[in-house]
Image (tube, helix red, strand yellow):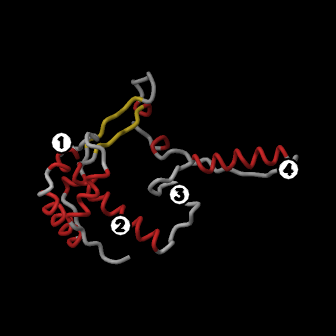
């Protein structure tokens, strides 16, 4: 992949794609304000480029606020909480730029298969494979054929970690 050079237009595009009032992190900054302060896009682009050139991000870029959201009514057990971390708006803007560049590179060089769409922008995650399974099941049943299939169930990482 070619080296990434972030321009003010890249920052403006990243800011434009995000909802205005998404939860901010420690910076407390909503995207609404970044959309309005167009002059700041050039400053952000320069700072992002410096961080990429130095191959290091300031700690405030990657420090978030973690909220524990209960999974059910039992709030006495720590494993019954789901951690949600709100990252700083500035970090979201930087990673949005990088994600767009990586996606463009993958598409133009045809690096990813079409079937690998779980994490792709606009991908449907697990919905598409489930729909395919349902259609295959109906076709097999209608044509009275045998079908052998296997599914792998990956346990969620958070649920497999001790929380004591």
Q: How many marks?
A: 4
> What residue is pinned by disc 2?
101
Question: Could you say whether the residue bearing mark 3 is in a helix, strand or loop?
Answer: loop
Q: Nearer the viewer, residue 23 or 80?
A: 23
**Is disc 1 surrounded by few (<14), some (14 to 19) or many (20+) residues within 10 Å?**
few
> Which residue is label 3 attached to?
117
Q: Which mark is residue 28?
A: 1
As helix, strand or loop, the secondary structure at mark 4 comes to loop
Query: Cα distance, mark 1 to mark 3?
Result: 33 Å
Q: Does label 4 or label 1 sit earlier along the sequence? A: 1
Mark 2 or mark 4, whichever is nearer to me: 2
Looking at the rendering, which quadrant does residue 97 occupy?
bottom left
What is the C-alpha distance between the residues marked 2 and 4? 45 Å
Residue 146 marker: 4
Mark 4–mark 3 CB contact (< 8 Å):
no
How far apart, in angstroms, are the residues tagged by discs 2 and 3? 17 Å
Residue 75: image location, x then y, percent: 40, 24
In the displayed structure, would residue 91 be above or below residue 86?
Answer: below
Earlier residue among tags 2 and 4: 2
Residue 24, percent from left and from top: 24, 42
Number of other residues with Cα within 10 Å of mark 2, as a class: few under 14, some 14 to 19, many 20 or more: some
Q: From the image, state whether disc 2 or disc 1 is nearer to you.
A: 2
- What kind of element bears circle 1? loop
Kindly check if marks 4 and 1 are in contact, taking CB atoms under 8 A apart as contact: no
Q: Position of residue 111 (x, y in %)?
A: 50, 71
Q: Earlier in the sequence, mark 2 or mark 3?
A: 2
């Amino acid at each position: 992949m070619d080296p990434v050079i972030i321009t003010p237009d890249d920052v403006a595009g990243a800011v434009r794609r995000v909802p205005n009032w998404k939860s901010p992190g420690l910076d407390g900054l909503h995207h609404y304000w970044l959309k309005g302060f167009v002059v700041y896009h050039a400053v952000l682009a320069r700072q992002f480029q410096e961080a990429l050139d130095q191959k290091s991000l300031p700690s405030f870029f990657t420090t978030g606020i973690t909220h524990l959201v209960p999974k059910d009514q039992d709030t006495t057990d720590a494993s019954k909480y789901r951690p949600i971390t709100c990252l700083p708006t500035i970090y979201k803007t930087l990673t949005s730029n990088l994600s767009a560049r990586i996606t463009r590179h993958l598409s133009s060089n045809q690096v990813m298969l079409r079937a690998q769409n779980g994490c792709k922008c606009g991908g449907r995650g697990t919905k598409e494979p489930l729909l395919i399974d349902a259609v295959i099941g109906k076709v097999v049943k209608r044509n009275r054929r045998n079908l052998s299939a296997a599914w792998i169930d990956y346990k969620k990482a958070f649920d497999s970690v001790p929380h004591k």
